[in-house]
Amino acid sequence: MPKPSIRIYGDPVLRTKAKQVRELDGRLYDLIEQMVAAMCENEGVGLAAPQVGSLARVIVARSDTEEGTEVFRLINPRIIAAEGIQEGMEGCLSLPSLRGQVQRSAQVVVEAMTPEGKDITIEATGLLARVFEHEIDHLNSILFVDRAAADTLCWLIPDPEAEDGYRLEETTIEEAKRRFARLRAKRQAKEEAQQ
């Protein structure tokens, strides 16, 4: 199976609802491990199968704890309970460098199946709850920009003079769509040149 590339905003697969996984097999396991590798390689905290072109209801996520990094591989995940509210800036590997303020639940309970076929229930708070909601949204063809307050959209621009090493530059969804269309065209031309 070739290494998947992360799909960019505007790709139709990101607006297609994922389908329930009914069979656990080697191809699914390979997909999941490639998703984990792509998530880590791109320094993400979560990734959904549509982001790599698959319509399987699969997400991966990672959580850094005092004991180390825990990686979740979840098949057919669904949120069965949610409570509280948290607001924060979100980004997405499919919308590189774009950020926006999104309101999410402060705590969620997720039911899913592991690649080994075991049913599990996970209680998550804070960032992990946000990641689970964000990635499960992807499975339902919802992107963070659909939930973000329009006036909070901004680009994360590297800036060595800034305190955190980057600055924020306001943008609009229309400008973001144009930028991502150019990025997709450039990537497609590069892939065609390599064939």
Image (spheres, rainbow, N blue to C red):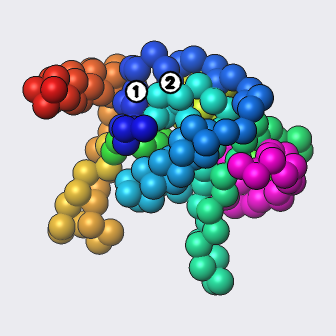
Q: Residue shown at 71%/49% (left/top)?
A: 115
- In this rendering, the count of numbered labels is 2
Please, what is the three-letter code of the amino acid marked with disc 2?
Answer: Leu
Which disc number belongs to residue 19? none
| Mark 2 crowd level (few <14, some 14–19, many ≥20, 10 Å Cα) | many
Q: Position of residue 63 (x, y in %)?
A: 62, 65
Residue 163 in sight in this render: yes
Q: Is residue 11 magenta?
A: no
Q: Residue furthest left?
A: 193
Q: Residue shown at 64%/24% (left/top)?
A: 18
Q: Position of residue 3 (x, y in %)?
A: 37, 42
- Residue 139 to residue 107: above or below: above
Marks 2,1: beta carbons within 8 A: yes
- Residue in front for this viewpoint, 97 or 103: 97
Q: Position of residue 35 (x, y in %)?
A: 50, 47
Q: Residue furthest bottom?
A: 67
Q: Is residue 65 left or right of residue 107?
A: left
Q: Earlier in the sequence, mark 2 or mark 1?
A: 1
Please, what is the three-letter code of the amino acid marked with disc 1?
Answer: Tyr
- Residue 65 to residue 3: above or below: below
Calculate the distance from the C-alpha at mark 2 to the C-alpha at mark 1: 7 Å
Q: Quadrant of the C terminus?
A: top left
Which disc number belongs to residue 14? 2
Q: Is residue 56 left or right of residue 153?
A: right
Q: Residue shown at 88%/41% (left/top)?
A: 80
Give the quarter of the image for residue 194.
Answer: top left
- Residue in front for this viewpoint, 85 or 186: 186
The magenta region covers 111-134
Q: Quadrant of the N terminus?
A: top left
Give the quarter of the image for residue 94.
Answer: top left
Residue 143 in sight in this render: no
Q: Mark 1 — residue?
A: 9
